[in-house]
Amino acid sequence: MTQTQRCFLLVEDDDDHAEIVMRTLTSHNASRRIDRVRDGVEALRYLRNQSPFEATPVPDLVLLDLSLPRVDGHQVLEELKSDEDLRRIPVVVLTTSSAAADKEKAYSNHVNSYLVKPMDFEGFRAQIRGLDEYWGEWNRVMPGSA
Amino acid sequence: MPLVVVNANGRVHECNAAFQAALGLEDEDIVDDNFFELAGGEFDTPRVRELFRDLVERDLHVHDVVVTQSSERFGRRVYLFSASSVTLPNDAERYLLLSIEDVTAAHDALRRRTEEVEQFAYSVSHDMKSPLVSVLGFVGLAHEELERGNPAEARALLGRITSSAQRMSALIDDLLRLVQIGRADPRDETLDLARLIQELIDTSLSGPIAAARAQVVLEAGLPRVRASRSYMNQTFSNLLGNALQYGCPAPGATIRVGGRPAAGGYRIFVRDEGPGVPEEYQERIFGLFQRLGPSRNSTGIGLAIVAKIMDLYKGRAWVESADGKGATFWIFLPSERVLEQTGSA
């Protein structure tokens, strides 16, 4: 296989949610690489390859929670999308918030997609599998990315 | 209450001092002036003209109509308008009595309060959903494990479901505590703070202290205060809980509690040896659901409770911290709540 392994970055402070997302993703696709960071500061350091993330790849997708300690998801999105080098990385917001204000703010900051975590597991599993197939298989990454 | 009597053409017949003061016209004689030209035409707006016309032509009385306007002279102002027709003794002419109250401050305070309530409802709905998503997720994963014939994995997930439900319960308890502050009027007692904090250390905090392998040292200078026992318990329980959670990076850490007199009252501190609170977060962490660490370890409500209690007591809560050198959480109690210093802990 010549293609480099595709990688998702999960930005999620809640350990339980992170585990559910990661287990659901890997049970669908065991070879998917998922890196996880716990807050906005770590997310930006990861994406900019700053310590301790010097060796991390450019992710094919950022899965971003909105409610995060220190720097929240909206701020991460804003910084990412106004950064010449990072703005091309697709970002999908994955949140419990269905508030119109959050959606508006995320789309004005050029989010690629906005997903609300469903309150039933079947829905959640379908959502995560759809995500994996679309962003991990169908979507063509930028030339020169990972 | 600012009152003015005008005739059907808008000519001022008389007014009271409050009306003149509201428009900054204390030193002017405004009788016979045109109402719509007063104070640079403050009331010459389509809405006020419409109200005036309704009154003159159709005798429609106006009661507590809110009119918002902006002028160079007064900036943005919100007025409460009421008006009705009046007759004066020995005068055949018809007059209008207008009461025009400047309610800008009350209106803005109410708007801020509404925004706060909206923000509260938003945060609550978001943070309450979070453990529920975990419960449903783990239930789904446990089903999957059972279908795959892994009962041990499924059993482990049941434990996670229990913790998520407990987290939800803690969240609800803390939220109830937060909304109850200031609702009922709790009885003030004379409290020896050193004793109250020692009781917390020996009872509800003994588990967390042992888990963090920390020690809490009460320094001299904690005062006796007049306050609600429940509020003081919540204040110190949350401050110490916070220090145990974030301020004890290694076993053997010491948390110090003490106090000293300050201008107009008394300052009490809880000092930890943790990584500290960077300046940009020092104000934010007293807000609802604002955390510096992962959410599973705290409800994000504790410091908001402390801030609300201090607000109610006309005191203050804040944090001082030099990065990497621990954090000192302070509360200030105004002198009417402080009896005297006990001398030693």
Image: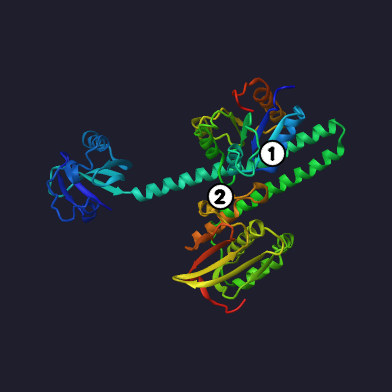
Q: Position of residue B244 (x, y in %)?
A: 66, 60
Q: Residue at x 28, y 41 (%)?
A: B70
Number of marks in picture: 2
Q: Nearer the viewer, residue A42 or B254?
A: A42
Q: Which amino acid does the dot numbered 1 rest on? A: Ala
**Does residue A32 lie above or below B48 as drawn?**
above
- CA–CA distance between discs 1 and 2? 23 Å
Q: Are marks 1 and 2 in contact (CB under 8 Å)?
A: no
Q: Quadrant of residue A77?
A: top right
Residue position for label 2: B288
Q: Is residue B231 left or right of residue A20?
A: left
Q: Position of residue B40 (x, y in %)?
A: 19, 44
Position of the C terminus of chain B by quadrant? bottom right
Residue position for label 1: A18
Q: Residue at x 64, y 44 (%)?
A: A52
1 or 2: mark nearer the eye? 1
Circle 1 — which element? Answer: helix
Q: Quadrant of residue A57?
A: top right
Query: How many other residues sit within 10 Å of disc 2, few (<14), some (14-19) or many (≥20)?
Result: many
Q: Is residue B281 left or right of residue B63?
A: right
Name the subunit of mark 1: A
Q: Residue at x 67, y 58 (%)?
A: B249
Q: Position of residue B17 (x, y in %)?
A: 21, 56
Q: Is residue B104 left or right of residue B274?
A: left
**Does residue B91 lie above or below B223 as drawn?**
above
Q: Which amino acid does the dot numbered 2 rest on? A: Leu
Query: How many other residues sit within 10 Å of disc 1, few (<14), some (14-19) or many (≥20)?
Result: some
Q: Position of residue A98 (x, y in %)?
A: 57, 34
Q: Nearer the viewer, residue B134 or B168?
A: B134
